[in-house]
Amino acid sequence: MAISIQIDRVSREYGPVKALDDVTLDIKAGEFFTLLGSSGCGKSSLLKLIGGFDRQTSGRVAFDGKDVGNLPANKRPVNTVFQSLALFPHMSVAQNVGYGLRLKGLSGASLDSRINDALDLVELSGFGPRDVNLLSGGQRQRVALARALVMEPGILLLDEPLTGLDERLRQQMRDEFGRLHKRTGATFILVTHNQDEALSLSDRMAVMHKGRIEQVDAPACFFEMPANAFVARFVGIDTLLRPEKVVSNAGQTVATVGGQTLAVRTQGVVDAAASVIAIRPDRLFLAPQGAPHALTLTVVETTFRGLHRDLKLAFSDGQSLVIAIEADTDIGRLSAGQQVAVGLKPDAAVLISSAGLPPAG
Amino acid sequence: MMIREGLSNRILLWAITIAGLIVIYAPPLYLLAVSFNPALQPGLPRLSDLSVTWYAALPNDRALVGALQQSLMIATITAVLATGMSLMAALAYFELRAQRTAWFLTVILPMFVPGVIQGLALSAVFTRSGIKASSLTVIAGHLLWAMPFAFIVILTSFAAVRRSYLTAAADLGATWWRQFVDITLPLIRPGLISAFIFSFLLSLNEFTRAFYLAGRQNTLPVVLFGKMNSGASPVIYAMSGAIFLVSVACVALASLHFMLRRN
């Protein structure tokens, strides 16, 4: 039932603007795949091509290996939950949900039972006769989901479906998507700019930027090995340090920042000038004074963040990093200018390409 | 919450409202009163004189009844055609992107051509090309007059049809035609009804174009005008009164219908 998608060197140009620039992507059947990026990165353009609402300028889009370039939206085994929901305002909940099935020629008891099953699935049993215009935001969202799912699509597209909902509903609907993905087994493609959504739901995700895909991986890999500085920033690794030099020796790579050395993990060829060190804040800890391999840094400021405190520390060359420490850790009084020792857990620092970072001033 | 105005302001508002209503409704009500006066000279009847003499004579006035039938027939055909053509023009408007404004102006242009000129022009063209004046020529003239209005009304109603509804329908498997029938038509229905009523009334009222274009059978406004100038019998007041009463009854029925539906 689930369908795989092959996107092969696809570009979509609007005059001189490239919304998609030579994108190649394989999405497996039954996968929960997320296209993540800020607005204007091309993720919605890509979704439109999969849904058949737009046509690529060049390249090939295929479902299960078959080119679908000439298949219009109404003939594709794809259904969409639109960002605006686009519920038909002149139809009841049941009429909205049953519309696609009615077009397929279903009627009577079999139509009703399919509609009721779909409403049960999104926990809206008994809402059939209601007016869609009088439902709450979360309920409307569920109707839109039911309307797409009732078609038993091989591919379900979710276009920023949680935008505009409050935080509690967001959490709830997010769980719902995960549950429905397991229940239906369809290929789910989610488009979002919210990395929390992407991380918690996806089997794999793609980070997009300026019409290109920067990285495709399982969510955890984005933290282990971000492809470049842009991706690291996007997933929330804010500490990116420019190394003075990088020395590789017997499989061990050591970088120098502000006169201090730290071990870094690397991938492929190392070019110190085009690299930055991404540091995961959760793999840093305050070490006892004089501990081996610890960095000695100067306190800049501490910020209270509720469940934790951010401690901003500077190297001698002015570059800084942030450590999150538990709010009630007894670290005594830290005043600006004080020196502290910082230990690095294994794999805390990764040397990555500096692409996506503004050039050093 | 309603804001209570000061007393003097309220008196002023009511005075203006009542004055406005009098200006609008006094003339037709005066006409209505005249139609119940059995005297030959038009004037307000005394209460004791009220009679339906002229109404009784109405069905026997062949000229007036014929003109009324002609006008109703022309108005109905004009309204059907104007609504249908305006719907198609509006659909074209949404398909065209860059040339939208040009199309819009082209369709509404006849609205700005004075009736006298358009009537004369059409009459000249028809005569020249050997087309005899008939109901059809009047309908042609009225169509040019009513269609711009119907077009604007229908175009306005298209605001209810969001692009995303049609995309969603396509996503669920609807062809262009099904999207039109299932989504567009129900959403613009109020606009279609308004456009129909509007065109019907515009045609029923129209004088100048009909004056130039009518064949053997004149329309009601033309006949009424002729009869008034020739000082004919007060049956024309009964005819006006009857039309006024029917209009009021229609509006009352419509409001009743909406009030009942709301409850």
Image: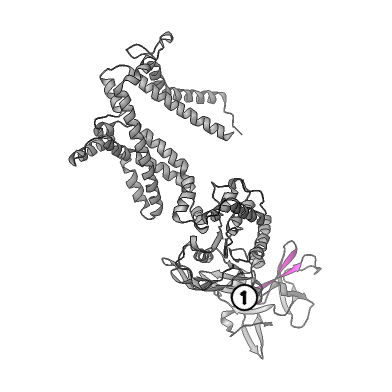
Q: Residue A36: horizontal and vertical position, in percent?
A: 58, 67
Q: From the image, tell me which residue sits under label 1.
A: A226
Q: What residue is rendered at 32% in x and 43% in y?
A: B109
- How many other residues sit within 10 Å of disc 1, few (<14), some (14-19) or many (≥20)? many
What residue type is disc 1 on?
Pro
Q: What residue is rendered at 41% in x and 35% in y?
A: B197
Up the image or down, A145 lies above or below A25; here it is above
Q: Is residue A306 magenta?
A: yes
Q: Is residue A349 left or right of residue A63?
A: right
Up the image or down, B90 lies above or below B206; here it is below
Q: What residue is rendered at 63% in x and 53% in y?
A: A113
Up the image or down, A270 lies above or below A76; here it is below
- Closest to the observer: A90 or B56? B56
- Closest to the observer: A328 or B183? B183
Location of residue A101 by image quarter: bottom right
Give the secondary structure at mark 1.
Answer: loop
What is the magenta range?
A: A300-329
Q: Residue A194: horizontal and vertical position, in percent?
A: 62, 63
Q: How is the image coloured?
A: one colour
